[in-house]
Image (cartoon, helix red, strand yellow):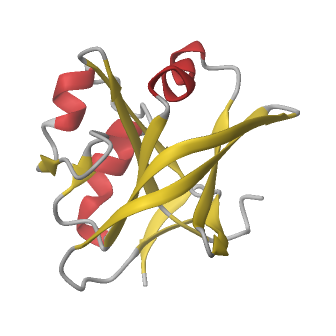
Amino acid sequence: MARYAGHVQAVTTEWEGVRRGVTATAACSVSDDPATVLVCLNASNAKNAIFEESGRFALNALAAHHQPLARALAGFDELPVEDRFALGHWQRLLTGAPILSDALVAFDCRLLEIRRMSTHLVLFGTVVAMHFGPENPPLLYLDRAFHAL
């Protein structure tokens, strides 16, 4: 899978004052009516349970200049949660999930369903709001490294 290029996403939520953000490349559209997306997260990380507890998530498409944020949310730099989120400017739409203000596009989702598939959780979300940021080159992940298109 390291040879399979993917657009880098920041998947975020907040529940009872606790924020969680992770970097993911396994995300896509499922349906346009109703608008539905999916994202795959590592099931072995107990901190990812917050996505089910909150019942909401945002899928933020990252641009090339978001590489420091992507690294931080992936845990590469071992920063505390608040320091990770400090690398971006965040807002809220309908669900309360953190939306990156300058994401290429952000989908604000209500959690529809979670399925466990082997090592990963597949989160299905109904898109209830969208935010369009400025046009910029996307951030990709390929061969275990970030790249700009």
Give the residue at x 37% y 44%. Answer: 71
Give the residue displayed 15% in from the left and 47% down from the top.
90
Q: Nearer the viewer, residue 52 or 133?
A: 52
| Residue occupying image coordinates x 65% and y 57% | 26
Residue 50: image x %, image y %? 48, 21
Q: Is residue 34 above or below residue 43?
A: below
Q: Position of residue 25 (x, y in %)?
A: 58, 57
State the residue lying farthest toward the right. Answer: 118
As drawn, 80 above or below 120: above
Q: Is residue 59 left or right of residue 79?
A: right
Q: Classify residue 55 as left or right of residue 138.
A: right
| Residue 84, x across and y down, in percent | 24, 33
Tell me the quadrant of the picture where the N terminus can be found.
bottom right
Question: Relative to 128, is 27 on the left or the right?
Answer: right
The picture quadrant where one finds residue 135 is bottom left
Q: How many marks?
A: 0
User: What residue is rendered at 33% in x and 38% in y?
Assistant: 72
Q: Quadrant of the C terminus?
A: bottom left
Taking depth in this image into account, of 136 and 76 the one nearest to the observer is 136
Q: Quick one: 71 or 24, which is closer to the camera?
A: 24
Could you tell whether 4 is left or right of 35 in the image? right
Q: Is there any visible trace of residue 81 in the rendered image?
A: yes
Task: Pinpoint residue 78: horizontal percent, then vertical percent.
Answer: 35, 23
